[in-house]
Image (cartoon, rainbow, N blue to C red):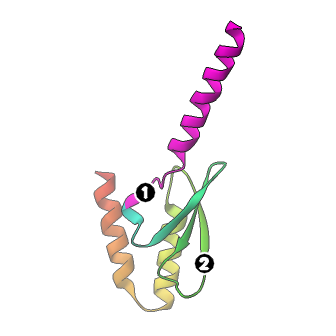
Amino acid sequence: MAEAETEEEISDDNETDDNKTDVFPWPYLASFFEFKGIKDNSVKVKCLLCSPKNVELSAYINSPSNLRKHIKVRMACYHNHRHLLFFDKILDKRRI
């Protein structure tokens, strides 16, 4: 009986951890990307700047560098560096 209770408590703890990890790790980038979810160690997002085109990206959970690269390449194509400057400014504030 005690073993069953212990297993049940462990499974409850795992469910709580899963719910906590399904949160956008970079909420300060919400003006650029819509959070879709987390799978394995990757964060799935949709680029809001590429609308109406549906561009979904993924980035390793510890680093938004793929997202920065996307903004850099896309905005250079559109000759709109304002978004890139704003993006860099946000990231610089987060590094402090």
Residue 58: x %, y % from top left? 61, 63
Using the image, determine if residue 67 lies above or below residue 50.
above
Occupied quadrant, residue 5: top right
Residue 26 marker? 1
Q: Residue at x 35, y 69 (%)?
A: 88
Check disc 2 and give the amino acid type: Val
Q: Nearer the viewer, residue 3 or 59?
A: 3
Which image quadrant: the N terminus?
top right
Main SS, magenta region, reads: helix
- Tag 1's secondary structure? loop
Q: Nearer the viewer, residue 85 or 32?
A: 32
Badge 2: few (under 14), some or many (20 or more) residues near its Cα, within 10 Å?
A: few
Q: Nearer the viewer, residue 43 or 68?
A: 43
Q: Residue at x 60, y 29 (%)?
A: 12
Numbered circles on residues, count: 2
Occupied quadrant, residue 44: bottom right
Q: Which residue is mark 2?
A: 55
Q: Which residues are magenta?
A: 1-27
Using the image, determine if residue 71 lies above or below residue 29.
below
Check disc 1 and give the amino acid type: Trp
Residue 59: x %, y % from top left? 58, 60
Residue 52 marker? none
